[in-house]
Image: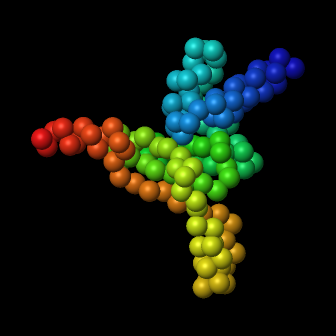
Amino acid sequence: MEATTKQFRKRNAILTCLRGTMLHPSAEMVYEMLQETNPDISLATVYRNLALFRSQGLIQSLGTVNGSERFDADTHPHVHFVCTECGAVMDLPQVEPPLSLGAAAEESTGCQVQGCQLTFTGLCGSCKSKMKEETS
């Protein structure tokens, strides 16, 4: 019984961590964020639970950024921006996802679209300022 309780405590901590941050963290970032309050959690446990949450539709993978898969607990359709310099990932709530693209894709292919992610890439404000300073 104690092993099951520990398992659910860790699982809940991982999901709570993801839901409580806007960083769109990698497994390694989640692991580091949980170390202080859950020193007995392993990186393997984090990876295993992220895969479980993704398969259950509780989180989404945003793909790989600077060599690490990044995750988002917000699964409703929304737009992201990824900085190609520092790897920051941010939501763009002011940009509406073009949901009509799914219908257009279905119509042109005869396939059934089940999801779409729109991600802009470029330099975040901080990196853009740094680049400007370096060239000045």
Residue 39 vs residue 128: left or right?
A: right
Question: Where, by quadrant of the figure, is residue 132 drawn?
Answer: top left
Which x, y percent locates residue 37?
63, 15
Colouring convention used in this rendered image of the protein: rainbow
In the image, what residue occupies the spot 63% across and 21% down? Answer: 41
Residue 53 visible to an observer of this rendering: yes
Question: Where, by quadrant of the figure, is residue 96 drawn?
Answer: bottom right
Residue 27 vs residue 1: left or right?
A: left
In the image, what residue occupies the spot 72% across and 45% down? Answer: 58
Residue 126 vs residue 17: left or right?
A: left
Which x, y percent locates residue 135?
13, 43
Which x, y percent locates residue 8?
78, 27
Residue 7 visible to an observer of this rendering: no
Q: Quadrant of the N terminus?
A: top right
Which x, y percent locates residue 39?
60, 15
Question: Where, by quadrant of the figure, is residue 86 drawn?
Answer: top left
In the image, what residue occupies the spot 60% across and 43% down? Answer: 72
Residue 73 vs residue 62: left or right?
A: right
Numbered circles on residues, count? 0
Which residue of the protein is positioned furthest toward the front in this rendering? Answer: 94
Which residue of the protein is positioned furthest toward the left in this rendering? Answer: 136
Q: Quadrant of the C terminus?
A: top left
Does 88 appear above or below 5? below
Does 28 appear above or below 55? above
